[in-house]
Image (tube, rainbow, N blue to C red):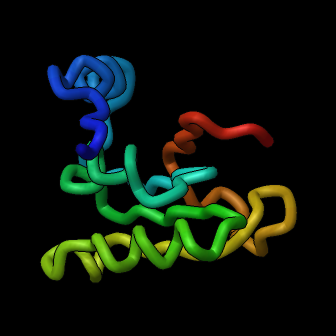
Amino acid sequence: MPVLLDPEQAETRAIHDLIDFADKDIVDVGCGDGRMTWRFAARARSVLGLDPVAVSIAQARADTPAHMRQRVDFRVADITTADLPRAAFDVVVLSWSLC
């Protein structure tokens, strides 16, 4: 039986109470399989999910809905070594990540 994370949407509500994702460029550090990414991606202008674990990124890509593929990108990368442009993001999200 699969484990349902956040079935009452408490975590999702809390993150939206803290951050306005509307039309923002987001980097999701340690995104894993996109567990949190999908909780804010629909409101964002763009989302870049980074994780050093290739199998997690493969799962996140596979789970990306077709209508979000222009807006959401997942990369195998570590935030400490990723080649990202300066000041390219409005919001950085870290959830269940150690950096």
Q: On the image, which quarter does residue 78 sit in?
A: bottom right
Residue 75 is left or right of residue 58, and the answer is right
User: Which residue is at a point 28% across and 72% down the rendered structure image?
Assistant: 64
In this orientation, which residue lies closer to the viewer: 69 or 35?
35
Residue 95, image x and y in percent? 54, 35
Q: On the image, which quarter does residue 16 sit in?
A: top left
- Specify whether residue 99 is in view: yes
Residue 40 is left or right of residue 49, and the answer is left
In this orientation, which residue lies closer to the viewer: 18 or 31?
31
Above or below, 89 relative to 62:
above
Residue 50 is left or right of residue 24, and the answer is right
Instruction: Please identify the quadrant where the C terminus is shown.
Output: top right
Residue 51, image x and y in percent? 64, 62
In this orientation, which residue lies closer to the viewer: 76 or 71?
76
User: Which residue is at a point 52% across and 71% down the rendered structure image?
Assistant: 57
Above or below, 57 relative to 6:
below
| Total marks placed | 0
Seen as rendered, the residue at the extreme front is: 1
Residue 43 is left or right of residue 93, and the answer is left
- Specify whether residue 23 is in view: no
Residue 79, image x and y in percent? 75, 58
User: Which residue is at a point 28% across and 55% down the rendered structure image?
Assistant: 41
Instruction: Please identify the quadrant where the N terminus is shown.
Output: top left
Above or below, 16 relative to 38:
above
Above or below, 80 relative to 17:
below
Residue 7, image x and y in percent? 18, 27
Seen as rendered, the residue at the extreme right is: 81
